[in-house]
Amino acid sequence: MIFKQFNFDGCLAYIIACGNRRKGAIIDPSHDAQPFLDFVASQSLSIDYVIDTHTHVDHVSIAPELADILGAKTVLSRLAPAQREIGSKVTELFGIEKILAENAMNRIDMHLADGDELHIGDLTLKAIETKGHTQDHVSIFAVDRIFTGDTLLIGQCGRTDLPGGSPREMYDSLFHKIMPLSDDLIVYPAHDYKGNINSSLGFEKTNNVCLKTKRTPAEFEKFLKGLFPPLDAKTGKLQCGLSTEPVGESNDIDPLMKSFCISMESFLAAPHNETVIQPEEFLQKVKARENMFVVDVREPKELEETGFIKGAVNIPVRQVAARIEEFPKDLGTPIVVYCASGHRSSHAAVYLRAYGYRDVKNLEYGMHGWTDRNYPLEHRQ
């Protein structure tokens, strides 16, 4: 996979492409076409689609401009006409009406419905309708990541008080569409004002101010009214998310979040053999009783069903951040993490690197690889 993130003063855009066939898509482009064109040329890519996750209100989409240059199709939700109709009725709202009018002029070559797929080489992009910020919002699922637009942002969700917004629909999108997805998904939003690069869905489920507390739809609607400051013409700039922590919320997660997302990018870019330990090597270390901290990040029920590797401590992946005090104080301590297949534990390894642990390895193939080799397991009495 070929992947690139672009940051225009907090507005995030992406290119994702198939490494084998060099076909790709651009997601949520804004501001300046040249960086996109330069990257496409540098990677010898053919862009098939230029996708907007929704009708933007804070900037003008350059999707048609890029599509014309690159011979691609512009793509928006099937509900874009309905969202544009809502926008056409806004006559004065801090300049938003001008952006809405300009975006409404952009052509749409393809419409996406919930579950529709786009193919770029060997990669498949799947649309998930996620209303709430606007009526025409879609998130894009691709392999191991999800582009959440202005629905799920890092640490929060998008505003719901703009034209076409709805806190009740945002609740449905977050808790019925996104929350059931895998914790392992890497989250790439359309905005971030704190310098974050990405997150993971598991991390957001545990730490996101909009997700971590169980609320009814009515309670969630009331919460959102207090979360975002009123639209204010004095700021001179509309932001679809918060640039500061909401009142009453702790800011302690910010340094960790920045370290986490940097660690995530480093993990994704690192050669595979530098981030994993093979079952054969790990078995020898276990037999030799080498000094290392072994963590089984599966759920307790999984350990009861299959057993666990001798010496392992059970800390489920979603509890790693909350139970960090249970890890060694020496950040140089070798740590091995594992799960059923290696997916959940790869994210645990990223969390631990974000905390400063320097020698963290993920067990290749996880328990599947361990049991396939008939390596020894322990069982609780």
Image: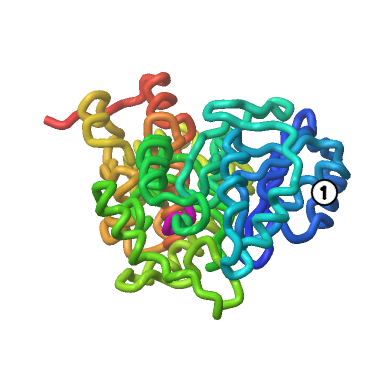
Q: Residue at x 51, y 74 (%)?
A: 232
Quadrant location of the C terminus in the rendered image: top left
Can see residue 358? no
Q: Is residue 369 left or right of residue 239?
A: left
Report x, y in % for residue 301.
22, 31
- 345 above or below 199? above
The amino acid type, in three-letter code, at marker 1 is Glu
Residues 282 and 268: in front is: 268
Q: Residue at x 25, y 31 (%)?
A: 303
- 240 above or below 296? below
- 228 above or below 219? below
Q: Is residue 358 left or right of residue 203?
A: right
Report x, y in % for residue 358.
48, 58
Residues 110 and 286: in front is: 110
Residues 139 and 349: in front is: 139
Quadrant location of the N terminus in the rendered image: top right
Report x, y in % for residue 188.
56, 49
Residue furthest to the bottom in view is 234
Residue bearing mark 1: 65
Q: Which residues are magenta?
A: 152-157
